[in-house]
Image (tube, rainbow, N blue to C red):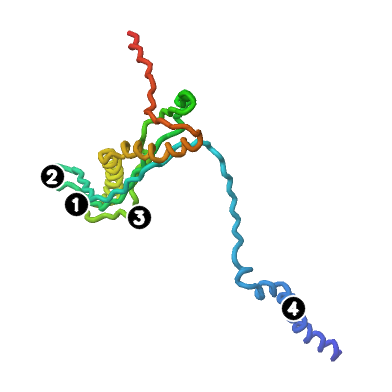
Amino acid sequence: MPLLRFLIKLLPWILIIAAGIFAWRSFKDFFNSSEEDKAPEVVVTYNTVLTAVEDLGRMELVRYNFKDVVEYEKEVSRFIPNSKVVLIVAGEAVGCVDFAKLQAGDIQFQGDSIVQVALPAPEICYYKVDHSKTKVFSKENTYFQDADLIQESYKYAEQNVKKAALNSGILNQTKVNAEKVLKPILEEVTGRRVVLVPQRRIQNPQMPAKR
């Protein structure tokens, strides 16, 4: 009887110890894991779809860099002052020749010493405002429309870059550079004297609309 009473008194302690051992075995990996093991796993799933393939034949021949102060003013109402944004703009425009427009008939061999190449007309490849070098100088009467006005002024500034490039003769300079760059290359490849002429296309006359 005394032994039985002793075992009954000891039983709760045995259960506590057993529960502790079980808990320690179950959670020891959790407490001993490093910080890297505790980091949540990140799974990234992506699907890249090819939507188009374009042949690029443009040769960039000149780049014009611009810096200007552009004032954009917008009428809001005749009863309140106009909104105004002033930008200090940095931009660039690039002139090029698109060789994708070159056809077999544009290259003509004349005898054994001359080859004539009809080049496509020079054009502006692209023009843009360099946002990293452009900043807003001042804003007046924006009436909580700052973001919209700045966006509109950037678009206006971008069109101004194109206009400034055309007025500065970027197309003519592209043509001049094409002579400097292309003639030596073509003469080296063909072993002949190269003559560059403007490409001309005959436009079919439009038929009058039927009545």
Whether residues under marks 1 and 3 lie with C-beta atoms below 8 angstroms apart, the answer is no
Residue at image location 44% in from the left, 29% down from the top: 101
Crowding at label 4, few (<14), some or many (≥20) Cα neighbours within 10 Å? few
Q: What x and y, as percent, mark residue 176?
A: 34, 38
- Of badges 3 and 4, the one in the foreground is 3
User: In terms of secondary structure, where does tag 1 sit?
Assistant: loop
Q: Give the residue pinned by disc 1.
A: 141
**Label 1 vs 4, first from the N-terminus:** 4
| Disc 4, SS | helix
Q: CA distance from mark 2 to mark 3?
A: 36 Å
Residue 21 tag number: 4
Q: Position of residue 122 (x, y in %)?
A: 36, 34
**Cα distance in 3D space between marks 2 and 4:** 83 Å
Q: For the residues marked 2 and 1, what is the alpha-carbon distance in whole angstroms?
A: 13 Å
Cα–Cα span, label 1 and label 3: 25 Å
Q: Amino acid at mark 1?
A: Asn
> Alpha carbon of mark 1 to alpha carbon of mark 4: how far?
74 Å
Quick one: SS at disc 3?
helix
Q: Earlier in the sequence, mark 2 or mark 4?
A: 4
Residue located beneath label 3 in the image: 132
Q: Which badge, 2 or 3, is on the more N-terminal residue?
A: 2
Can residue 54 be seen in the rendering of this structure? no
Query: In terms of sequence position, does the residue under pointer 2 or pointer 1 come before the other?
Result: 2
Mark 2 touching mark 1, by CB under 8 A?
no
Residue extending farthest to the top is 211
Write the residue at 21% across / 48% down. Answer: 71
Q: Nearer the viewer, residue 165 or 119?
A: 119
Label 2 is placed on what type of residue? Phe
Looking at the rendered structure, the kind of residue marked 3 is: Ser
Taking the spot 31% from the left edge, 48% from the top edge, the residue there is: 65
Q: Which tag, 3 or 4, sits closer to the chain's start?
A: 4
Query: Which residue is disc 2 drawn over?
Result: 79
